[in-house]
Image (cartoon, rainbow, N blue to C red):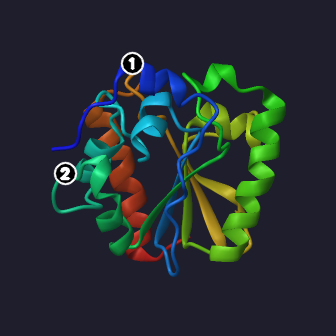
Amino acid sequence: MNPKPSRTEILAAANTRVPDLIGPNLKVLFCGTNPGLYSAAIGHHFGRPGNRFWPAVFAGGFTERLLSPFEDDDFLELGYGLTNIHERASAGMAELSNAELKSGCGRLKAKVLIHAPKYLAVLSIGAYRIAFDDPHAKLGLQPVTIGVTRIWVLPSPSGLNAHHQPAALGRLFAELRAAVEAGRA
């Protein structure tokens, strides 16, 4: 069992970062907006207990069992990576400026060009619209690529996102998994 960070440790994580989890031949590079303070405090992506990323990944069929944030190396071994549009940890996306999202997008695109995952899955339609300068983007497969990498937009798995409940997130993640497994564009 991994220890829960103290309030002091969580607050001290502001403006720190969580290292990318990227390797060769990724099927999907999952991309959050930026690390939350809890995630930064424990050093693992989507670490806050109320975050629905790991349950959505499991419900979507990417893993055979529900992984914890501390098992992210197992996730990488399955061919899935983790990164963020912007590296700076904060209490929420609202603390990031549009300029930070756009500059983070430039760094993200460089990572994607280097590692060339099959798909980049951006986990926030709002962050995608700002960072990629596409105000009319919809969820799902995007009409643009980064090099050979297809872009797929999913809702934010944050527990604060009331628009998409766990069952809906699982279905949307399963659509991406089906596309990945089918090898379709």
| Of 48 and 140, the residue lying toward us | 48
Above or below residue 165? Residue 69 is below
Q: Nearer the viewer, mark 2 or mark 1?
A: 1
Image coordinates of residue 42 in percent, x first then y, are: 39, 40
Circle 2: residue type: Leu
Residue at point 80% right, 53% down?
106
In this figure, which residue is indicated by the disc labeled 1? 7
Q: Is residue 44 visible?
A: yes
Query: Of callouts 2 and 1, which one flags the residue occurring earlier in the amino acid sequence?
Result: 1
* Marks 2 and 1, how far apart at CA: 26 Å
Q: Is residue 70 left or right of residue 149?
A: left
In this figure, which residue is indicated by the disc labeled 2? 66
Question: Given contact means CB atoms under 8 Å apart, are the residues at marks 2 and 1 in contact?
Answer: no
Circle 1: residue type: Arg
Residue at point 49% right, 74% down?
26
Q: Is residue 104 left or right of residue 170?
A: right
